[in-house]
Image: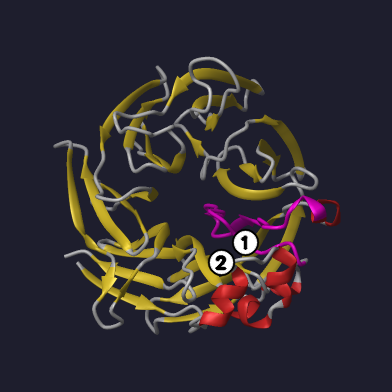
Amino acid sequence: MKVTAYVVRDAQLGESARKRMRGMLFPEMQRDQEVCDNLVSTVSLAYNPKDGLLYCGLTALDNDILGVFDLETKKYRSLGFRSVAERFDIKVHRSLQFDDDGVLYAATAGLHDLDERAQGVGGKVFRYFPDTGKFEILGVPVPREYVQTIALDRKRKILYGFTYPVSYAFRFDIGPRTGKNLGYINSMPHSPVIDDEGNLWGTWTPFYGPTASRSCLFKYNPDKDEMTWTRTALTSLYAGDAGGIDAVINGGDGFIYVGTTAGAFIRLDPRTVEVHYLGHPLPSGRIAALVVGQDGRIYGCGGVDYDTHLFAYDRATDKFDVLGPIYDPQRKTSVWHTHALCEAREGLFYVGETDNPDRAGYIWECQVK
């Protein structure tokens, strides 16, 4: 595997800035020019085959949170989201979804605390028209709450999502631009997923009983407008795994595949709510992103603290293939924490990097041989 890192912002934080950050709250980070301008992460990725560009959602304290990476020039450029942002809009966090017509849907996340909660209107769902470069704000699904992640039901024209830091599930109907709070879930699954029948799946965390503090599954049926709460947990054979969803995808084969925060890889049958532990493919924790590859294999990335890897899972043979560390030999550095994964062309993957304490996060190109 050939790995090359590309710059979003070419920023190395000095020692003084790193020390200042340790005690900073959100408003202080926004006021500190060095931290605000340079501390960015790439937390969402989506490839648009219509224009050949990789769309990138960032964490950026200066509200410049959406841009594109050109696969030919290897350059990143901003799309100018600051023109429609307010100061609490500092992330497009696992929230890039293309519709069939090439329109991009996304949502804004925040990092402010309770003392500023009353000042924020809430996370906005919006769409971007690549042909015209225009943004359109569609609405705020849950007032005061910011949107951590979304999923698009292209058939029903519904956006689903989860909020943070108070965890609600919601649906947002694009046509009438109406949002509905589906309830408090006491959980922070990184991604919602829609099964083949159009049901939304996510996790909730019980307060009491044998499954307390474990991530249990819920299903929402949009046609019946009905929530089903189960006590089925996504725990694995791996000790200490509470089953928290880090990454989740519809495999296109009738199953849902989950990577947990503890690094387990799990298959869910949404018809029976049966959970099957498939393995623990990486030496370090977290499976932060998953995609179905153009060759039919499932690809994932994960790991922590510069010990990060890309892997593939072959469903026909039930085998994992660790493709290598996400390490650029020219820059002599690795991904700190992976967060997003996208296959732009067959065998050509891009990884988004988050939470690096030393520098701005890169966009990582991984050419699988």
* Residue bearing mark 1: 91
Q: Position of residue 185 (x, y in %)?
A: 63, 31
Who is closer to the viewer here, 297 or 118? 118
Q: Position of residue 345 (x, y in %)?
A: 31, 64
| Structural crowding at the residue carrying mark 1, measured as other residues with C-alpha within 10 Å and reported as few (<14), some (14–19) or many (≥20) | many
Residue under the image location 68 percent in, 31 percent down: 184
Q: Is residue 83 above or below residue 175?
A: below
Q: Quadrant of the N terminus?
A: bottom left
Q: Are marks 1 and 2 in contact (CB under 8 Å)?
A: yes
Task: State which quadrant residue 47 falls in.
Answer: bottom left
Q: The magenta stretch spans which residues?
A: 87-115
Q: Is residue 268 above or below residue 327?
A: above
Q: What's under tag 1, amino acid-wise?
A: Lys
**Dot 1 or dot 2, earlier in sequence:** 2
Residue 58's disc is 2
Residue 159 in view here: no
